[in-house]
Amino acid sequence: MTDPSWHDPAEPGPHSPPPGYPPQYPQYPAPNFDPSAPYGRHPVTGQPYSDKSKLTAGLLELLALVGIGGIGRFYIGDTGIGVAQLLTGLCGIGLIWSIVDGVLMLVGSVNDSQGRPLRDGT
C-alpha cells in the first residue's frame, strides 16, 4: 500500500483528472414561478392562462359534427351557453353555432368561465 500523505496535491498524480475537468457549465437562474399563474401568462395581456386546453375544448365542441353540441362549453365551465347549444342543437341552428364556436376555441378567441385565455396543449 502507498501512503497518500507524501503526494503533493498541487502536482497531477496518476489518478487525478486532467486540468479543466469536470467542465464548468454556466449556471442559469431558475425561472420565476408564479403560483397565481401555474400555466404561465399571456404574453400580450399578462392574464394567467386557464387550466383548460383550447385543443381539448375545441375538439369537444366539434362533437357537434356528430350531433352533440355544447360539450366544449361544459368543459371550460360555461354551462349556460352549453345548455343553450344543446337545446338549440335539436333544431339544427345550435349545431352550426357549436361548430363555429369550436373553431373559435381552437384559434384561441374564447376564454374560460373566469375570463382567462385557454392554454395551448392538451
Image (cartoon, rainbow, N blue to C red):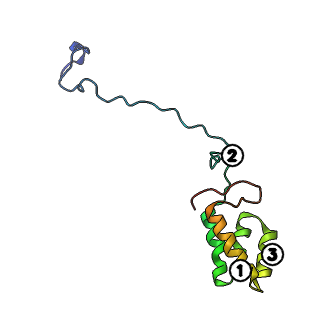
Q: In this orientation, which residue lies closer to the viewer: 72 or 34?
A: 72
Query: Residue sitting at 76 percent across and 55 percent down?
Result: 115
Amino acid residing under circle 3: Ala
Dot 3 falls on a residue whose secondary structure is helix
Mark 1 nearby-residue class (10 Å; few <14, some 14–19, many ≥20): many
Percent across and percent down for residue 101 are 69, 70
Whether residue 69 is visible: no
In screen coordinates, is 54 left or right of 15?
A: right
Label 3, label 1: how many angstroms apart (C-alpha)?
A: 11 Å
Percent across and percent down for residue 20 are 28, 25
Q: In this orientation, which residue lies closer to the viewer: 116 or 91?
A: 91
Label 2, label 1: how many angstroms apart (C-alpha)?
A: 32 Å
Q: Which residue is mark 2?
A: 45
Label 3, label 2: how many angstroms apart (C-alpha)?
A: 30 Å
Mark 3, mark 2: which one is toward the viewer?
2
| Vertical position of residue 31 compared to residue 11: above or below | below
Percent across and percent down for residue 10 are 25, 14
- Residue 24, quarter of picture: top left
In screen coordinates, is 103 left or right of 17?
A: right
Query: Residue sitting at 77 percent across and 86 percent down?
Result: 90
Dot 2 falls on a residue whose secondary structure is loop
Return the disc, 3 or 1, that comes first in the chain's sequence: 3
Whether residue 99 is visible: yes
Query: Residue sitting at 80 percent across and 81 percent down?
Result: 87
Q: Which residue is mark 1?
A: 95
Could you say which disc has been placed on residue 84 in the image? Answer: 3
Mark 3 nearby-residue class (10 Å; few <14, some 14–19, many ≥20): some
